[in-house]
Image (cartoon, helix red, strand yellow):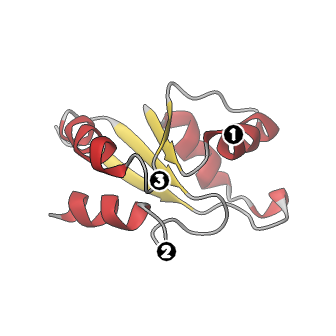
């Protein structure tokens, strides 16, 4: 079975802009990867969602984290990628995770 990597866009300034599907993705995730666990943890708390695992993915952790994340996807897990604000994969380490997942 193959897991799913879901890219979740976060609001820039207005929490009301968070899509209901984003909340659902967080609720279903086995792993949430983010640039800053404090910021994403705060967002999750504000929307009332608890996640199984929250892992930092940034320039300092990507080389050790990406292979582990890919292994978890191959194992069938649901992984959410989120940036601090806006859409992941644009000028952030998420871009490299997405490229690796496509390969």
The dot on residue 22 is none
The dot on residue 38 is 1
Badge 2 element: loop
Q: Is residue 18 left or right of residue 14?
A: left
Q: What residue sits 76% from the left and 33% below the top? A: 48
Q: CA distance from mark 3 to mark 2?
A: 11 Å
Q: How far across and how far down the image is residue 83, in percent?
A: 57, 59
Q: Is residue 63 above or below residue 45?
A: below
Residue named by callout 2: 91
Residue named by callout 3: 58
Q: How far across and how far down the image is residue 54, in percent?
A: 53, 33
Q: What residue sits 57% from the left and 35% below the top? A: 27
Q: Looking at the rendering, which quadrant does residue 3 occupy?
A: top left
Q: Is residue 64 above or below residue 88?
A: above
User: How many discs mark residues in the rendered view?
Assistant: 3
Quick one: 97 or 19, which is closer to the camera? 97
Q: Is residue 55 left or right of residue 66?
A: right
Q: Earlier in the sequence, mark 3 or mark 1?
A: 1
Q: What residue sits 69% from the left and 39% below the top? A: 38
Q: Earlier in the sequence, mark 3 or mark 2?
A: 3
Q: CA distance from mark 1 to mark 2?
A: 20 Å
Badge 1 element: helix
Q: How far across and how far down the image is residue 101, in percent?
A: 24, 57
- Alpha-carbon neighbours of circle 1 within 10 Å: few (<14), some, or many (≥20)? few
Q: CA distance from mark 3 to mark 1?
A: 13 Å
Q: How far across and how far down the image is residue 4, in percent?
A: 32, 48
Quick one: 103 or 23, which is closer to the camera? 103
Quadrant where the image shows the N terminus:
top left
Specify the farthest residue to the bottom.
90
Q: Is residue 26 left or right of residue 100?
A: right
Badge 3 element: loop
- Alpha-carbon neighbours of circle 2 within 10 Å: few (<14), some, or many (≥20)? few
């Amino acid at each position: 079975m193959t897991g799913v990597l879901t890219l979740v866009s976060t609001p820039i300034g207005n929490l009301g802009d968070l899509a209901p599907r984003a909340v659902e993705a967080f609720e279903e995730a086995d792993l949430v990867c983010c640039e800053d666990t404090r910021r994403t943890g705060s967002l999750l708390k504000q929307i009332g969602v608890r996640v199984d695992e929250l892992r930092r993915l940034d320039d300092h952790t990507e080389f050790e984290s990406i292979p582990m994340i890919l292994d978890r996807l191959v194992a069938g897990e649901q992984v959410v990628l989120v940036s601090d604000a806006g859409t992941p994969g644009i000028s952030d380490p998420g871009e490299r995770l997405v490229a690796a997942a496509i390969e």
